Image: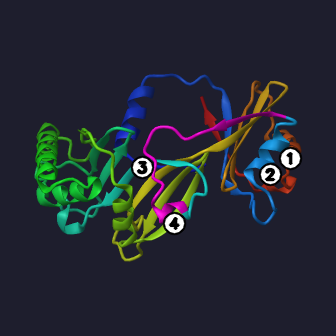
Amino acid sequence: MNRLNLVTGAIILCTILTAGCFDTGVVNYDSSVIDVKFEANNLTIADVKTQASQHYSVEEVFPGGGVTSTNVELLNSQFNTEYVINSMKVLVPADKKMTDDDNPEFFVLFAEQEFTNMGWYSLPRSNSTYPQDYVADTIKLSFNISDEEAGKYAEKFGENIMDTNKRNAGLEDDIIAYEPMFIPHQPDIGAIVGHLNERGDLNSNPLGSGYYVVDFYNSSLPYGSRSAGSLYVHTGYAKITHNAGNTEYVIMIDDMGRLNVEINPGHDSFSLEDGRVVLKVMFENIGHDAGLVDKLEFGMDVV
C-alpha cells in the first residue's frame, strides 16, 4: 500500500526512531485500498458493522489529533463523516522560494487542537534567501491574525531557518528538517482550502485505515507532482478482526466505503493464497462480494 510522503520531519523522526533496530523476521501483509461501492450495492457502514459483529470482533476507530472543520463545504462534500485534518502544505511560488533550483518548496502546518507547528520543506543551502514578506502574508492567511502578529512569527521563523542553513552549510546535498515553530493558534482551514482551490483541482486519494490525501492538482506546474498543496485527513473507520489459527486478519473500512486489509501471520508456513480464501469468507459475512478479494494487491512488511 502506498504511504504518504507528506512531511520531511515525520520521515526523519521515523528514521531516528528505527535506527539501529533489528527486524524480527516476521512478515506481515498490507493490501492496497479498494472501493466497495456502498451506494451501488445499497450498503452503509452501519450495515457492514451489524453483519460483521455477528461473526467477528468489530471496533469503531475515531480520528484523533489534528483539527476539525465543519464549515468547509468543499471538504464536507468529500467526507460524509467526522474527520480531522492533521497537516497542510502549500506550494511556495517559484519567485518566493529560498533556493534557486528545480525542486518544489512547501509551507507546512502540523495542526493540533490548541496549537500548530509551522515548517518549511526545502533543501537548505548556505546561499538561501528567506522571503519574509511572503511568509508573513501566508501566516496571516493561515491563522486569520493581524499583520503585526504575523510579521513577528515570520521574523522568528526566518531566524530559525537561517540559523539552520549556517549550521548545515556543508551538507548541501542532504535534506535537513527545519525545526518547526510553535504557534498558539489553530489554522483557518476554510482560508487555506480556499487558497488551494484557486490554484488547483481537488483530488482525494485514499491511503487506507481512514487516511486520505486531499491534493490540489495543477497540470501547469513545473514540478513532477503537479501539486499546488494538500491536506492530510483522517476519518473514522470500522476495524474488523478475525483470528484463524495463528493468523490475524484485519479489515478496515471507512464511511466512504474505502477498504484495506492487514494480515498478521503467526507462523512461517503462511500462504497468501490460503489467506485469500479466509478473506473471501469474511467478505461474504460482512455483505461484500468475495470476488473483491482478488482485486486486493498485497505488499510485505518485515517487522
Q: What element carries label 4?
A: strand
Where does label 1 land, which residue?
Answer: 280
Please tell me the numbered disc located at residue 128. none
The residue lying furthest to the front in this view is 71
Q: Is mark 2 on a helix, strand or loop?
A: helix
Q: Distance between the residues labelled 4 and 3?
A: 15 Å
Query: What residue span does the magenta drawing correspond to?
Result: 56-76
Q: How far apart are marks 1 and 3 (CA)?
A: 33 Å
Q: How far apart are marks 4 and 1 (CA)?
A: 31 Å
- Whether label 2 touches label 1, CB < 8 Å: yes
Residue closest to the eye, 174 or 73: 73
Q: Distance between the residues labelled 4 and 2?
A: 26 Å
Where does label 4 land, which residue?
Answer: 203
The part of the image, by quadrant, that contains residue 113 is: top left
The part of the image, by quadrant, that contains residue 26 is: top right
Q: Which amino acid does label 1 sit on?
A: Lys
83 left or right of 135? right
Local packing at callout 1 (Cα closer than 10 Å; few below 14, some 14-19, many 20+) is some
Where does label 2 land, which residue?
Answer: 293
Q: What residue type is labelled 2?
A: Val
How are the residues colored? rainbow
For marks 4 and 3, the one nearer the N-term is: 3
Q: What residue type is labelled 4?
A: Asn
Q: Residue at x 55, y 59 (%)?
A: 205
Where does label 3 land, which residue?
Answer: 6
| Residue 8 spot, x, y in % from top left | 35, 44
Q: How far apart are marks 2 and 3 (CA)?
A: 29 Å
